Amino acid sequence: MYNTSFFKKILFAATVVLFCSCDKDFNAIGDDLIGDDHFGLESEKYDVVAYNQEVTPVQSNSLTINKLGIYEDPVFGTTTANYNTQVTLSAYAPSIGEEPVIKNVILSIPYFSHTISVNEKGGYNYQLDSIYGTPADKGRLDLSIYESTYQMRSSYYDNGSQLTQMYYTDQTPDFEGHLGVKLNDSTDVKQNTKFFFDVAQKKDSTYDDSSKKYTYTYSAPEMRLNLNKAFFQDKILKAAASKLSAADVFQEYFRGLYFKVAKSGADPVNMALMDFSKGKITINYKAKTDITTDGDTKENRSIVINLTGSNVNLLQEVKKTEYQDALTARNKTTGDSRLYLKGGQGSLAVIELNDFASKLKEIRDNGWKVNEANLVFNIDATKMNAVGTDNIKAKEPKRVYLYDLTNNVPILDYTSDGSSSITTDSRMSKVVYGGIINVDATTKRGTSYKIRLTNHIRNLIKTTTATNVKLGLVVMDDISLVTSNKLKLKNDVISEVPRASVVNPSGTILFGNNIPAGDSNYDKRLRLEVYYTKPN
């Protein structure tokens, strides 16, 4: 029987933290979530083998969150993220009216943001979330938005079976070979060649003809661009009615949009995570009313095109030499001294608990009961403190995720943890399972990640038929998103990776197991620590 008093104390300590914490920045959450006072329990440490594994081109279609921009990570290298999406009419078979004339065409896509203060005009000041690299207001991108003529499909047939169509991170040439008209061709360079993620609150006005007054409305920051009026006059307002009659016909007729980024001269660059599915194109125009008695009277009308349907995030990775060398030189037998975790088409770590597995008979024969088991991943702060443009350091992942790599499923500790987030961010749930970054109060940089695998270890002891599976470790943002995406080409270690890692552009360097005795970082090497209750 396990030490129930121990777990009551753990539960009480965690509950106190959950109710008392008011820190909105979950980067500052520390190891105090689950204390290190083990009440005199005996611990054993076991060697592990941990090594790097490169993530080659990976499935990146139908992600809920996508990247757009260029992230120059001073540690890992440069990631360029483009995006292709289908589009859908908000209502099919629209009544366009006679003699339509476009007033404007507005593309709008909200950013992830939160308010930080009230401004002098009674509106709000905002801060953009999920910006990587140079701060939002300083970065500049050469942004081009094209009509895409690439026909994306959600499925295909093979030998009579319907299969899901997959698109991969390395398919940039395929999509850029099918570009139509450039649509964001405004003379305002902030909408194309000098584009930036604008943090300003949006203000819109509506004029009432009867009262002769304007009404103003305010909204959170968003990408808002004027698109080519002539294109949409011909493509939509002058289209044959049949082309706008149904979703399948329309998606064949207007196949989508392609968002392409490049550097804007010598300006610093950045990248944003965005939910493109909340974006839309609004065509504002005037046309004759449908009431025949109104004669030549024209009224204001609009048609909305949503950015929904099949989509793909296309990534181009240029790795720094040290990072690429570490991946190339990985040692699957003795393990690596450093573990390089990088999201997107990046890398993960493989962990094998062979030393512990070899001691299972001894543990069973002696009747040792596991109270807690942890893997603590110490961050190589020296390497992670490298600086890039404008003296900016790499953005550290808020979380890492340990999973059963052999079967590409969560470990038992993940599935059994029902704890909720201690912040307003629901992605920071499962605090007992852990993996949340611990931050130094002085430097505000990460020191370690701690993950509990108590139930995983107990299962290996209790169930003699349980397999000692390989474990995978990836960067993570949303802990609830554990579905996997397929690699384009399988290798001898992995065939898929967790989807949330594909979304995340950040990375970290952790100490591995293969650090020689006498090295100043020897005590930071990765080992499995298990706390037991041992019979007298």
Image: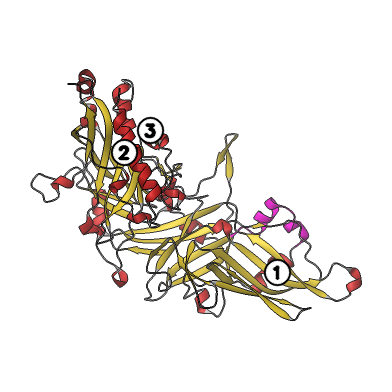
Q: Which residue is mark 1?
A: 234
Q: Is residue 331 left or right of residue 234?
A: left
Query: Is residue 415 depicted above or below 518 in this figure?
Result: above
Q: Is residue 110 magenta?
A: no
Query: Is residue 366 depicted above or below 77 in this figure?
Result: above
The residue depicted at 57 percent of the width and 77 percent of the height is 186
Label 3: element kind: helix
- Residue occupying the far top of the picture: 365
Q: Earlier in the sequence, mark 2 or mark 1?
A: 1
Give the image location of residue 460, x and y in percent.
30, 26
| Quarter of the figure with residue 78 | bottom left
Quarter of the image with the N terminus in it: top left
Label 2: element kind: strand
Residues 411 and 303: in front is 411
Q: Earlier in the sequence, mark 2 or mark 3?
A: 3
Magenta highlight: main SS: helix
Specify how the rendered protein is coloured.
Answer: secondary structure
The residue depicted at 65 percent of the width and 61 percent of the height is 305
Which amino acid lies under the numbered mark 3 shown in the image of this protein? Leu
| Highlighted range, magenta | 240-256
Give the image location of residue 298, x and y in percent.
81, 75
Give the image location of residue 528, x and y in percent.
23, 37
Q: CA distance from mark 2 to mark 1?
A: 59 Å
Q: Which residue is mark 3?
A: 412
Q: Which residue is mark 2?
A: 452
Q: CA distance from mark 1 to mark 3?
A: 57 Å
